[in-house]
Image (spheres, rainbow, N blue to C red):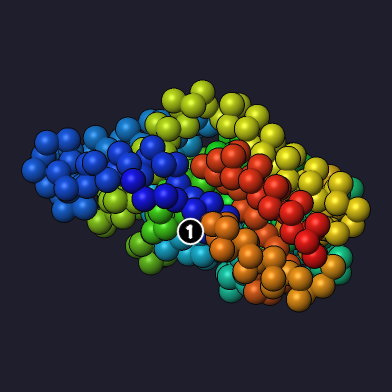
Amino acid sequence: MEKRIYNFSAGPAVLPEEVLLEAQKELYSYKGAGMSIMEMSHRGKIFDQVIKEAEADLRKLLDINDNYAVLFLQGGATLQFSMAPLNLMPPKNKADYIITGSWAKKAMKEAKRVGTVNVAASTESDNFTRLPKQSELKLDPDASYVHFTSNNTIYGTQWKTEPETGGVPLVCDASSDILHKKIDINKYGLIYAGAQKNIGPSGVVVVIIRKDLLERSSDDLHTYLNYRVHVENNSLYNTPPTFGVYMAGLVFKWLLNMGGLDEMYKRNKEKAQILYDAIDSSDGYYKGTVVKEDRSLMNVTFRLPNEELEKKFIEEAKSKGFEGLKGHRSVGGIRASIYNAFPKKGVEELVQFMEDFKKNN
């Protein structure tokens, strides 16, 4: 079998090898159906079972009760930047946004088209190197919801606990860290997540919404943008991204077989610790870019003494089979994305490479 590289890409990102091999095995003819999952009707019995199982397994992983609907939609998290305010801002037409990076800013931009946005806190003046403390949040008790981004892929910060909102529904873009640990779903009104980091291939977005909030979805909305329509149609209002849903389902089964999200969290902490320890013990040769208590377990960002060395580091790493380490174009530096499916061995080998690189440069 062809040797695989270590894929540190921020998204679309690494998928579990077992899942890829299973999909490969079933690609030509799905479980003896004589056709691929990509060819079959989304309204047929076989796909109906695939999407129902995927939902049931996601509910199991996150303990999602019947007060919540689970949707598999399209348009990525970016469409949710619009759908969330269009559905949830009424009738008050105002919402709080916590700004901790580029994606939060993009989400806010769309919300401003719908109603009044209160910036509850922003760490932009600190170049997003930290998250706001609870005491810094200036929340409007009359807001329709409070929106935050749980993990910031570009800057490498991650919320360890949810912001307290005093009963105002919490809306979360969890695209880059969903399923990295167990969370208490009951703290949220709405969670949305583009799949291409911790769930599956790009093209599907998972939406988990508290059912009582569906009352806010107005009949005046364009049909496809209405959450209530999708819930009533069990994610089948139109043709869903069938292959993406199938792949997501395989990943959910993989997570359950691994022992669930508590086991995943243990592994994720262990992997990140190995890499952060290497950065912190390099006598300043490698410098983490965010304050320690807000460091992400998913996206580890750091710098070298200068940009020339960073360029060399990326090129040499590539020749050794480490792909995707270049920081986001807006901030530069190095970024190692080590999502759920990224193997611990890859982190250990990167650390060895970092030690060698430091010695030689």
Let me know if residue 221 appears in the view: yes
Residue shown at 30% from the left, 39% from the top: 22
Rendered location of residue 67, percent (x, y): 49, 32
* Left or right of 163 on screen, residue 177: left
For the C terminus, which image quadrant?
Answer: bottom right
Q: Nearer the viewer, residue 49 or 97?
A: 49
- On the image, the x and y values in percent for residue 52 come to 31, 35
| Image point (80%, 50%), residue name | 279
**Circle 1 residue:** 12
Please indicate whether residue 41 sits to the left or right of residue 89 in the image: left
Relative vertical location of residue 360 with respect to residue 253 in this rendering, above or below: below
Q: Residue visible at 57% across and 58% down?
A: 320
The image shows a total of numbered marks equal to 1
Q: Residues within 10 Å of mark 1 (few under 14, many from 20)?
A: some
Q: Is residue 7 left or right of residue 300?
A: left
The kind of residue tagged 1 is: Pro
SS type, badge 1 = loop
Q: Residue furthest front?
A: 360
Residue 179 found in image quarter: top right
| Residue for point 8% across, 43% down | 34
Give the vertical position of 316 relative to 342 (above or below): below
Tell me residue 229's x, y (percent).
35, 52
Taking 51 as reference, is 168 left or right?
right
Residue 90 visible in image: no
User: Residue 234, position in %: x, y?
Assistant: 32, 44
Q: Nearer the viewer, residue 97 or 359?
A: 359
